[in-house]
Amino acid sequence: FDAEAYFKGKTMRIMVGFNPGGGTDAQARYMSKAWSEFIPGKPRIVVTNMTPVVTQRNYTWNSKPDGLTVAVEATPGIFDMVTPQAQFDMREVTMIGVTSGQEGLWVIRGTMGYDCLDSAFGGSEVLTVGTSAPTPADLGSYGVLGWLADEFNLPLSIANVAAAGSAEQYLMMERGDVNSWLSGTLWDQFPRTRPDWLPTGFIRPFADMSMAGFDLGDNGQLDFHCPNVSDAYLNDEQKRIYAAFRGPQIYAAKNVVGPPGIPAGVTAALRQALADAMADETFADKMQGFTGIKNNFFGGAEAQEQLRATTQAYLDLKPELDGIVAKIHEKYVK
């Protein structure tokens, strides 16, 4: 396979399932300018935004498997896969590589009368989040908030909104439509995207929702002093359920995938190009500086096996989780 001849003169398209302005869009736009230098033949790269994210994933899944259409995704896509609109199976997509992952956070507006999660146990001031959840299956990772609310008597309301990417979440917080936000890789983005939010106390840490053992730490403006939820508050049985909710969402955050069936030579060339780019200090540092997202790279072959295993583990637990999520949706989604 002659990768140089294959990609030379071609145009690659990076799909993004969110509107411009969020972290996933920022990474895709940085890659559209800088990744080509590491791909044999140096193809032109363009970015296309297509919302909602399930529509974009369907489009990528159904694209010609030639390696010229890939997507930068915000999550592993496992929760998206089980929504009614999904046409894809994450066990069969072509994984190019994962650039970040493991982290998650829940922040609240500074006007809230809480400190960290345990200060809201049995509280009366309602924590309001926004996500697009017309059905229980659409709740995705936000189901964990309803589960925590039931386990620890947290006052919670989940607003069902039309779109809930980062761009929309910023606006909802600023308008006061919601008073808290569950996300993945935003802690190190805030100093860039909303540099006044933390110094002025507009938002504050509430819960470290990362994978067990991960510490969000200091982002240069503030230390995320609230403890990791799994490590600090949960018993073994609770950890099992919590990991089932969180793992499919955040074990890998930003990742590059293509449709199933991309030829082995093309896949290998793209995987190597991403690995070379992430190993290049200039590329990696500039991408992290541009997006505010911590790099945590692992290669495509390893990521492919992890994605298959994590997807299957979730599907094996799904009957149990479905019962929990149905009750959460009925109780908390407004």
Image: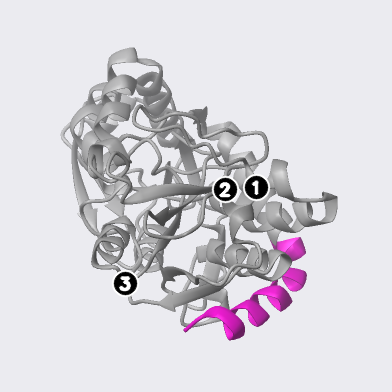
Q: Which residues are magenta?
A: 315-334
Task: Calculate the distance from the C-alpha at mark 3 to the C-alpha at mark 2.
Answer: 22 Å
Q: Secondary structure at mark 2?
A: loop
Q: Which mark is residue 229?
A: 1
Mark before the other along the chain sequence, 2 or 1: 2
**Residue at 59% across, 53% down:** 117
Is 80 displayed left or right of 46 in the figure? right
Q: Which residue is mark 2?
A: 209
Q: Are marks 2 and 1 in contact (CB under 8 Å)?
A: yes
319 part of magenta stretch: yes
Which image quadrant for residue 168?
A: bottom left
Residue 5 on image: x %, y %: 25, 27
Q: Residue at x 41, y 48 (%)?
A: 204
Q: Is residue 111 above or below residue 264?
A: below
Residue type at mark 3 is Asp
- Structural distance between the alpha carbons of marks 3 and 1: 25 Å
Magenta run includes residue 314? no
Where residue 54 is drawn, which disc sits there? none
Front one among 172 and 31: 172
Q: N-terminal of the two: label 3 or label 2?
A: 3
